[in-house]
Image (cartoon, helix red, strand yellow):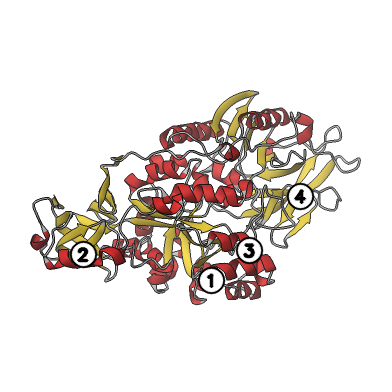
């Protein structure tokens, strides 16, 4: 057994302690912990059971019933719930730690006080930079945590072959190898949905390796087309999907036997519309799961994690117990872990919350594996940092320094005005719009037009120092004055994205990130206004979550000071190169029409791409 496997043995497996649990339930042995006078939120029956006692042994529930007096011994810790609710620990069914700007350890530090005790993470961000070796690093950090962090093996690296070049690649043989790692729970979101429908060998091979291992295949069908392409995708094996934005999306997925994952992240608000399939159409709630996909550090520290999602779902008309089911039992069943997590019932891991008000999900204390982890919003345990090696650092390779001229867009021909394609950012959603705009030329170039909310966008290749810079235009940020933001978080290939109204500031921002090894930086009027350093793969900070959250807040403030009014502009910025979500994106290969999966010229009727 390797070191990673050793670190997973933080509690006794059920088969090895079942006899002890029986003895506790029968009163022949004493419990380690007993919670008395609780209101038991039972997600199996969908009810709240009054006046319940709960006994824990070896980090697992042993007894849930009216009176646990017979399980109390001289060394048993007894907690009087005093009529408060005992709720299963919350599960995030799909998310990417890297989007939080922090490591797995720091992510856990941030979310444990908010009641999250299980996470299903897809580290395809680091996979796009460091390949299988990067996935292994995050896997090993995940299995070392005091809460449950399962890893989905990235499936699409690059996400859209032929439309982008990532820093690494993942093939079916890599998927097959990872399926034997102790913390791997399944295959991460299969984003190349045209590839699945076309029986692409890479997609078919990765899905087959996962199914042969008896694990779950994650889905990602980002098209609004629910016709033949959708049916072909479902037939290929994906078992869930979090890319729906409409009620009909949720209905279509559930009818085809998939789980509809409804997300509320820092910038994506997809729960309210889709949950109508349950609240208005009466579809079976067992097939709906809540997730974040994704939350940045500021949201985690200041607003919450899965507790925030559950509260939001309740606000849409769900009963509290129903919303909790969608963030606990439904998730556990989907990943084949219903005997381990997802409910407060005998044999399961003793992951639970003490909640004083169910409707507002007011969390007084958080327990994981029978151990008190947080109380009154404060973490009570120390989490040892994970040491990322040198190979995970210094990953930003830019042929530079970059000059302002590299961000200039030459005008096609000798014309005073051109028609350009324009990426349109959509507030609180991952999809973009494919727009066109008439722009004036100046001195042989096409400048941005901040007065009409048209900014420059550039993608700088950062894995192989090729010197490639792709230039285009974007709308929706609302920037005024001379400013620019650059980020090496650029889903999914994670090159460097620079958005700005002024080429000089764009050059300053890009060169700054190359200097420090990655992160996100904002410049205005030639001055650095905000910086979040992310030296680990150019994706994650090595600082504490609260420090990163403060820097992220400073970044948002700098963006707002330059006219940006988007709810979470950093998250929107980070998706502008995501060439598997419609409609128009930018990549190192050019401007990509995701609805047709082809490269298109920047100028309508022109040849310049």
In the picture of the structure, the residue carrying the numbered disc 4 is: 589
Quarter of the image where one finds residue 328: bottom left
The tag earlier along the polypeptide, 2 or 1, is 2
In the picture of the structure, the residue carrying the numbered disc 2 is: 21
In the picture of the structure, the residue carrying the numbered disc 1 is: 211
CA–CA distance between discs 2 and 4?
A: 59 Å
Give the structural element (helix, strand or loop) at label 2.
Answer: helix
At 21% across and 58% down in the image, what residue appears? Answer: 57
The residue mark sitting in front, 4 or 1, is: 1
Q: Are marks 2 and 4 in contact (CB under 8 Å)?
A: no
The tag earlier along the polypeptide, 2 or 3, is 2
Q: Are marks 4 and 3 in contact (CB under 8 Å)?
A: no
Q: Are marks 2 and 1 in contact (CB under 8 Å)?
A: no
CA–CA distance between discs 2 and 3?
A: 41 Å
Disc number placed over residue 172 in the picture, else none:
3
The quadrant of the rendering that contains the N terminus is: bottom left
């Amino acid at each position: 057994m390797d070191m990673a496997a050793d670190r997973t043995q933080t509690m006794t497996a059920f088969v090895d302690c079942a006899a002890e649990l029986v003895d506790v339930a029968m009163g022949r042995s004493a419990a380690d912990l007993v919670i008395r006078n609780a209101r038991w939120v039972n997600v199996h029956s969908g009810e709240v059971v009054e006046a319940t006692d709960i006994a824990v042994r070896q980090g697992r529930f042993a007894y849930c019933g009216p009176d646990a007096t017979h399980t109390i011994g001289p060394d048993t810790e007894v907690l009087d719930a005093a009529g408060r609710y005992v709720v299963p620990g919350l599960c995030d069914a799909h998310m990417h730690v890297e989007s939080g700007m922090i490591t797995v350890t720091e992510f856990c530090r941030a979310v444990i006080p908010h009641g999250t005790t299980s996470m299903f993470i897809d580290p395809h961000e680091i996979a796009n930079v460091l390949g299988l070796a990067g996935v292994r690093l995050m896997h090993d950090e995940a299995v070392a945590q005091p809460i449950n962090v399962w890893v989905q093996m990235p499936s699409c690296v690059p996400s859209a072959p032929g439309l982008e070049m990532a820093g690494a690649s993942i093939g079916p043989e890599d998927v097959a190898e990872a399926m034997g790692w102790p913390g791997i729970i399944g295959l991460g979101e299969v984003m190349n949905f045209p590839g699945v429908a076309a029986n692409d060998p890479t997609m078919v091979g990765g899905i087959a390796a996962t199914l042969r291992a008896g694990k779950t295949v994650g889905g990602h069908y980002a098209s609004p087309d629910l016709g033949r392409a959708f049916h072909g995708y479902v037939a290929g094996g994906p078992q869930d999907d979090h890319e729906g934005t409409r009620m009909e999306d949720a209905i279509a997925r559930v009818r085809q036997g998939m789980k509809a994952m409804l997300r509320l992240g820092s910038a994506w608000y997809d729960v309210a519309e889709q949950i109508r399939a349950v609240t208005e159409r009466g579809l079976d709630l067992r097939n709906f799961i809540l997730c974040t996909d994704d939350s940045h550090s500021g949201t985690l520290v200041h607003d919450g994690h899965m507790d925030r999602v559950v509260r939001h779902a309740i606000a849409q008309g769900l009963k509290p117990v129903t919303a909790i089911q969608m963030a606990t039992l439904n998730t556990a069943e989907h990943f084949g872990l219903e005997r381990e997590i997802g409910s407060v019932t005998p044999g399961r891991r003793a992951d639970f919350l003490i909640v004083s008000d169910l409707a507002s999900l007011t969390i007084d204390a958080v327990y994981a594996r029978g151990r008190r982890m947080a109380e009154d919003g404060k973490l009570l345990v120390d989490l040892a940092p994970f040491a990322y090696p040198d190979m995970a650092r210094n990953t930003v390779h830019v042929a530079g320094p970059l000059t302002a001229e590299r961000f200039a867009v030459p005008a096609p021909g000798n014309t005073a005005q051109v028609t350009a394609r324009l990426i349109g950012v959509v507030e609180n959603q991952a999809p973009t719009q494919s727009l066109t705009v008439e722009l004036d030329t100046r001195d042989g170039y096409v400048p941005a037009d901040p007065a009409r909310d048209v900014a420059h966008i550039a993608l700088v290749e950062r894995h192989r120092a090729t010197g490639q810079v792709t230039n285009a235009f974007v709308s929706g940020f609302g920037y005024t004055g001379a400013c620019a933001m650059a980020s090496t978080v650029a889903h999914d290939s994670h090159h460097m994205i620079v958005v700005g109204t002024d080429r000089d500031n764009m050059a300053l921002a890009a060169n700054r990130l190359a200097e420090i090894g990655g992160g996100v930086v904002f410049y205005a009027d030639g001055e650095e206004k905000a910086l979040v350093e992310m030296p680990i793969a150019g994706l994650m900070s090595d600082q504490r979550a609260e420090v990163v959250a403060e820097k992220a807040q400073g970044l948002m403030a700098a963006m707002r000071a330059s006219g940006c009014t988007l709810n979470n502009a950093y998250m929107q910025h980070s998706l502008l190169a995501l060439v598997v979500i419609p409609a128009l994106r930018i990549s190192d290969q050019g401007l990509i029409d995701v609805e047709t999966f082809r490269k298109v010229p920047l100028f309508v009727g022109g040849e310049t791409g």
